[in-house]
Amino acid sequence: MKTLKFLALLLLITNCSKSDETNGSTPVVNNKYLISSEFLRSHSANGLALVAGAFISLSDLSDPLKNIEAYKIKYKTTDIDGSEIEASGVVFVPQGDAEMPIVSYQHGTISDNDNAPSNVESLGNDEYTIMAVFSSFGFVVSMPDYIGYGASVASEHPYEHGK
């Protein structure tokens, strides 16, 4: 069930097709871009509140922070020459049944593959942590690794060459 919810949240990178049958069955998903999704870890609202509390006042929040789950996704995109390439990223999904807005966050320049969002292993002093906290406010957050990092580390990041 969690996988189905996760896939529904990735509407920007999936292509759904509607079945002719309307008997209440699960719709058939014809996925053109998403290769895989892998559960990485959960982050508790309490742990994220400790991190957030170091930087902002949480006493003014109208809603409590939410537990979140982090997923590594792999998807098809195009490289600078127009060829298909596999890329990756991380998606944070707050837990709960409420409708949640989706935020796409493009991280700053990195030079080490360990700093690609899908390769970060724990909360710390980085953009992964900032966006995990942001997600706990009720936002689904996607963070691409960029070509040249994560699943496409064997390729050159377009920013890093003169052509």
Image (tube, rainbow, N blue to C red):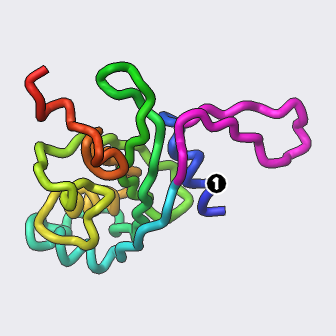
27 magenta-colored: yes
Closer-to-camera residue (157/51): 157
Q: For residue 84, say whether it is visible.
A: yes
Question: Which residue lies at the image location 56% right of the left edge and 36% below the top edge?
Answer: 14
Q: Which residue is mark 1?
A: 4
Question: Which residue lies at the image location 76% right of the left edge and 31% below the top edge?
Answer: 18
**Residue 30 locus on image (x, y percent):** 69, 36
State the predominant SS element of the stretch in magenta: loop
Residue numbers of the magenta segment: 14-36
Query: In the figure, is residue 134 to the left or right of 73?
Result: left
Query: In the figure, is residue 35 to the left or right of 138?
Result: right
**Residue 90 locus on image (x, y percent):** 36, 54
Q: Quadrant of residue 126?
A: bottom left
Q: Quadrant of residue 52?
A: bottom left
Question: Which residue lies at the image location 78% right of the left edge and 48% below the top edge?
Answer: 26
Closer-to-camera residue (89/161): 161
**Residue 122 locus on image (x, y percent):** 25, 73
In this view, 68 is above or below 144: below
